[in-house]
Amino acid sequence: MNPLILLPGALGSKSQFESLQQELNALNLQNLSLDLAGHGKLPPQPNVVNVPEMAKAFLQQLDFQRIDEPINLFGHSLGGYIGLYLCINYPQRINKLFTLGTKWHWTKEIASKETSMLVPESMEQKIPAYISHLKSIHSLDWKLVVKNITHIMNDLGDNLYLEPENLATIEHVVRIGIGDRDTMVSLEESQNTYRALKNGQLQVFPLTKHPYEKVDIKTLSKAIFDFFN
């Protein structure tokens, strides 16, 4: 069976998948979690501040792990975006893709709105518990991690990597997952992406918000097992 890789979203870490991995292991679905570049315990990569470089850095991790066969990929949020980008630009590296809570529609205005909430000084005052969490999961200074993500979001606003004509070239089976209470990602943009795919699927998770910590792990593990198995 193709290796199953779990990829977190922006500001996330592979450590968040511990419970999910336990559930998948109980279902006899072997898996491996990896971090996005500049996240978790990976060495700093200051120049990886756009989607193409993020995708290349992920492929380098696969090469380091000696994984050269096509992978099954579950990506949350930005991890899902990177996954679909790989389907277009490195199709031989992906077997099937399952995304959850991925924001597909970006403009300069949307990027500006999202990055306006990523001001370290304001974050320290408004969400100190979350800042403590960031400090615990990243080896890089959390402020630099946030800064790099603002660059990524601005890159998404400037470059339309996943235009419908590009999505139409994808032959992979892709399931687009979204929580019905996700306030960052709209059902409309998820539907538009799913409909642009030749072999797309759409799954709506009930009572589910955007943050990964708000996802029901048993429901998600069952969906992942059913899709990749």
Image: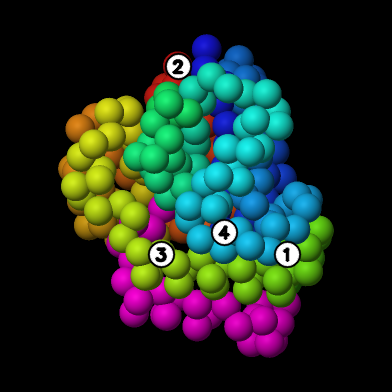
Q: For mark 2, what is the residue?
A: 229
Q: Are marks 1 and 4 in contact (CB under 8 Å)?
A: no
Secondary element under disc 1, as helix, strand or loop, is: helix
Mark toward the viewer: 2 or 3: 3
Check disc 1 and give the amino acid type: Leu
Q: Residue at x 68, y 64 (%)?
A: 46
Q: Are marks 2 and 1 in contact (CB under 8 Å)?
A: no
Residue 18 drawn above or below residue 106: above
Q: Which residues are magenta?
A: 102-128
Q: CA distance from mark 2 to mark 1?
A: 33 Å
Mark toward the viewer: 1 or 4: 4
Q: CA distance from mark 2 to mark 3?
A: 32 Å
Q: For mark 3, what is the residue?
A: 156
Report which quarter residue 3 is drawn in.
top right
Q: For mark 1, what is the residue?
A: 134
Q: Residue 111: where, in percent of width, then height? A: 41, 74
